[in-house]
Image: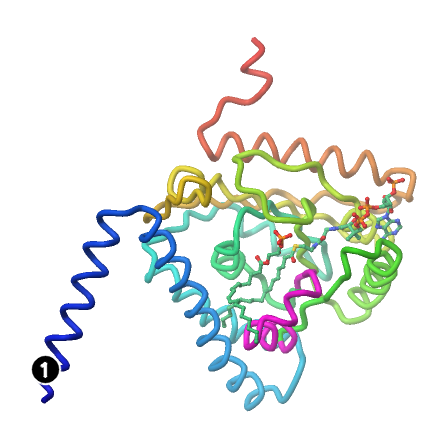
Amino acid sequence: MELGWLLWGTAVLLLLHVLMELSPSVNFALRIGFYCVLCLVASGLAAAACLLVNGGRTVKNMRIIRAVVRTFKYFFGVRFEVKGLENFKVEGPAIIVSNHQSILDMMGLMEVLPDNCVQVGKKELMYTGTVGLITYLGGVIFINRKSTSSAKMVMSEVAKTMVAENVKVWVYPEGTRNCTGDLLPFKKGAFHIAVQAQVPVIPVVYSSFTTFYNPKTKLFTSGKIKVEILPPIETKGLTSDDVTDLTDRCFNTMRETLFRLSGRPSEAKDSS
Ligand SMILES: CCCCCCCCCCCCCCCCC(=O)SCCNC(=O)CCNC(=O)[C@H](O)C(C)(C)COP(=O)(O)OP(=O)(O)OC[C@H]1O[C@@H](n2cnc3c(N)ncnc32)[C@H](O)[C@@H]1OP(=O)(O)O
Ligand SMILES: CCCCCCCC/C=C\CCCCCCCC(=O)OC[C@@H](O)COP(=O)(O)O
């Protein structure tokens, strides 16, 4: 009886392996499916740990979430090469901005996440079962992207509480996932908060995933992600009139870094 199950199990695994070798789209679907199942199961377990250790919604839970998510890279053969971690060592609160390529970014986020740091996320994440529960318990700030006025109100409230509670806030200023190897224009919310709270902006750049991950071509193999934490950009003395300039400066620095980390010649070099 047990031998029968073992044989069936082996046969199913072999079949999946052959299918994955034969068809890139099956390979892609299975790997992404596995990632989602892993997130859902790990979130359930982490949520129980968070409730037992910290009792409810608090940024302290991010330490537990970070420890769990840091094991995910071994399942997918993803390696990280991190530079500039010392730039996170600024005293007190800060706004961290980074590029957002895929749902896989949660691995890169947790790889470098400093203590006392929460993220801004779309409110739809709350309805993803255990993943929604863990984002809630971790203190993620939910915004309604369909309502600019309510998103702006939440962001302005964040500018006040982050200073009072000494937390860093991680924002994806592109506002959506973008896996093209370039950046989308930045939305200004993160930079408004930084100026309102008079806290530095710390840019973080992840190299392009396109060599090992591309949902359009159904590519998902193992690969290396370079991460660079750039020096903080001070905002002391800046006013709302300076937000556009601050946004542009940050965008240009991050775009140059993205191209350098991804081995793509920058526009300036292109035209020369
Ligand atoms: C254990 C296992 C676990 C496994 C799972 C792991 C889970 C781990 C937990 C971690 C979870 C992380 C979750 C990450 C989720 C990532 C996301 O969801 S990304 C999507 C959501 N994020 C964002 O959208 C952030 C960036 N967006 C912005 O900053 C936007 O500006 C906005 C505030 C949302 C508003 O956007 P929009 O409505 O599109 O309007 P704009 O064009 O940007 O702005 C209009 C206008 O208003 C000005 N303005 C913007 N903000 C402010 C402000 N705070 N104060 C004053 N004015 C503001 C802006 O300048 C524009 O005016 P202008 O004249 O054109 O300049
Ligand atoms: C009971 C309901 C069950 C629902 C099950 C849903 C399954 C979801 C399972 C796993 C998902 C793992 C995702 C980890 C968190 C990813 C956060 C993220 O990257 O969100 C994307 C968002 O930033 C940008 O959104 P868009 O690019 O604008 O879109």
Indicate the secondary structure of the residue bearing disc 1.
Answer: helix
Q: Position of residue 65 (x, y in %)?
A: 52, 72
Is residue 129 shown above or below 75? below
Residue 124 is drawn in which quadrant? bottom right
Is residue 237 shown above or below 34? above
Residue 63 is drawn in which quadrant? bottom right
Q: Is residue 28 magenta?
A: no
Seen at 54% across and 46% down, the residue is 101
Give left or right: position of 132 versus 249.
Answer: left
Q: Over which residues does the magenta segment extend? A: 119-137
Binning the other alpha carbons within 10 Å of mark 1 as few (below 14), some (14 to 19) or many (20 upward) gives: few
- Residue named by callout 1: 4
Q: Is residue 121 magenta?
A: yes
Q: Position of residue 24 (x, y in %)?
A: 31, 46
Give left or right: position of 140 versus 212.
Answer: right
Q: Give the quarter of the figure containing the C terminus.
A: top right
Q: Position of residue 210 (x, y in %)?
A: 44, 38
Hey, what amino acid is under mark 1?
A: Gly
- Closer to the camera in the image, 20 or 67: 20
Q: Position of residue 26 (x, y in %)?
A: 32, 53
